[in-house]
Amino acid sequence: MHPDLLRSPERLPLSAGSNWRASLALDYTLEAQRSVLRYRHDGPLRILKSLYPEGDAVCHNVLVHPPGGLVGGDTLDVQLRLAEGAHGLITTPGATRFYRSEAGALATQKLHAQLAGGSRLEWLPLEALAYPACDALNEARFELAPGAEMMAWDITALGLPVAGAPFDRGRFAQHLEVCGVWLERGLIEAQDELLMNGALGLAGRRCMATLVFAAGHAITRPRQERALEAVRALIEAQEREAAPEAGLIAGATAAHGQVLVLRALSHLTEPSLQLLRQAWALWRHELWGLSATPPRIWSM
C-alpha cells in the first residue's frame, strides 16, 4: 500500500478532481445450500475473502475502504442484493471516518440493499466517526420482499472527546430506511446547543447507536414480545453494570409491525457498541435460532 494511504486525509493536499468516488456491487446467491458472494467494484472499495465460520449457510464478509476515511466530495456507494434463501453478514475492519470538509462539500456514504424472499442480511459495520467540521451524509436503504429478514445497526460517534477534538463544528446527516415501512432521518448540527446538550436531546452524550430487526412481513406478536423482553432485560443489566461515567441509556420498542428497534446513547463508543453486539447475539438466538458467531475480525 502506498504510504500516503496510511495518512489521515486531513493531512493530504486536496486539489480539484482529487475526490474518491467508489462503488461496490454485492450479489449473494444460494448454490447447493451454500451462500455465495460475487461482486464488482469501481474505485477504492473492496470486499475481502468470503469466510464460513458457521457453515455454508452464512457467508461472512469484510468491507474495506483503503483510504481509511472520507473528505468533502467523496462518495462511497454500496449496492447489495440477496437472492432467495441467501444469508450474508457484512462488517468492516474499523470506523468509517468523515474528516473535515472543505468549501462546504458533502462526504457521502450510501447503501441500497434488496432482499428477496427467504433471504437474511446482517449489516454490522463499525462506527461512523464524525470529525470536527465534517459535512457528511450516512444513508442506508433496505428493501425486503415478503419472507426476507435482516438485522442492521448504525453507530455514530461525534468528535474525538478523548483526544481533545470535540464535535463543535460541522454537521452529520443520517438516513435509515426500510422502504415503504419505516423511515428515520436526522441532522446533527454541532452548534445546535439544545440538541447537543439539552435534556431532551443528546444530553452531552456523543455516541448514538441503533440496532434494527426488520422483516418483509408482519412479525408475530409472540415473536415480538420474546425479542423485546429479552433485550430489555439485557439493557437493564448493562445500564446497571456500566460505570456512571459511561452515561449509557437505552431502550427497545416495536416501531412498526415489521420493525424492532433498539436505541442507545453513551458518552463514548465502547458502551453502546458492546450493548449492540450483545443484543445482536441475543436477537440472533431469539429470532433466528442461531448461535452468536461474531466475525473473526472483531477479535483481532
Image: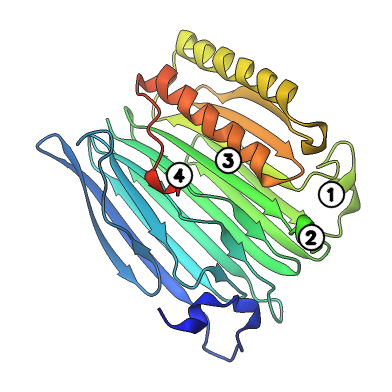
The residue type indicated by label 3 comes to: Leu
142 left or right of 72 in image: left
Query: Helix or strand or loop: what does disc 2 sit on?
Result: loop
| Picture residue at 85% right of the left edge, 45% below the top | 204
Task: Identify the residue under disc 3.
Answer: 183
Of callouts 2 and 3, which one flags the residue occurring earlier in the amino acid sequence? 2
Q: Of tags 2 and 1, which is closer to the observer?
A: 2
Of callouts 3 and 4, which one flags the residue occurring earlier in the amino acid sequence? 3
Q: Of tags 3 and 4, which is closer to the observer?
A: 4
| Picture residue at 61% right of the left edge, 29% below the top | 262
Of callouts 2 and 4, which one flags the residue occurring earlier in the amino acid sequence? 2
The residue type indicated by label 1 comes to: Met
Of callouts 4 and 1, which one flags the residue occurring earlier in the amino acid sequence? 1
Q: CA distance from mark 2 to mark 1?
A: 10 Å
Q: CA distance from mark 1 to mark 3?
A: 22 Å
33 left or right of 262 in image: left
Task: Identify the residue under disc 1.
Answer: 196
Of callouts 2 and 1, which one flags the residue occurring earlier in the amino acid sequence? 2
Label 1: few (<14), some (14–19) or many (≥20) C-alpha neighbours in 10 Å: many
The extreme bottom residue here reads 15
Q: CA distance from mark 2 to mark 3?
A: 26 Å
The residue type indicated by label 4 comes to: Ser
The percent position of residue 293, horizontal first and vertical second, equals 37, 33
The residue type indicated by label 2 comes to: Phe
Q: Contact, CB < 8 Å: mark 3 with mark 4?
A: no
Task: Identify the residue under disc 2.
Answer: 167
Task: Identify the residue under disc 4.
Answer: 299
Q: Of tags 2 and 4, which is closer to the observer?
A: 4
Q: Of tags 1 and 3, which is closer to the observer?
A: 1
The percent position of residue 296, horizontal first and vertical second, equals 38, 44
Label 4: few (<14), some (14–19) or many (≥20) C-alpha neighbours in 10 Å: few
Q: Contact, CB < 8 Å: mark 2 with mark 1?
A: yes
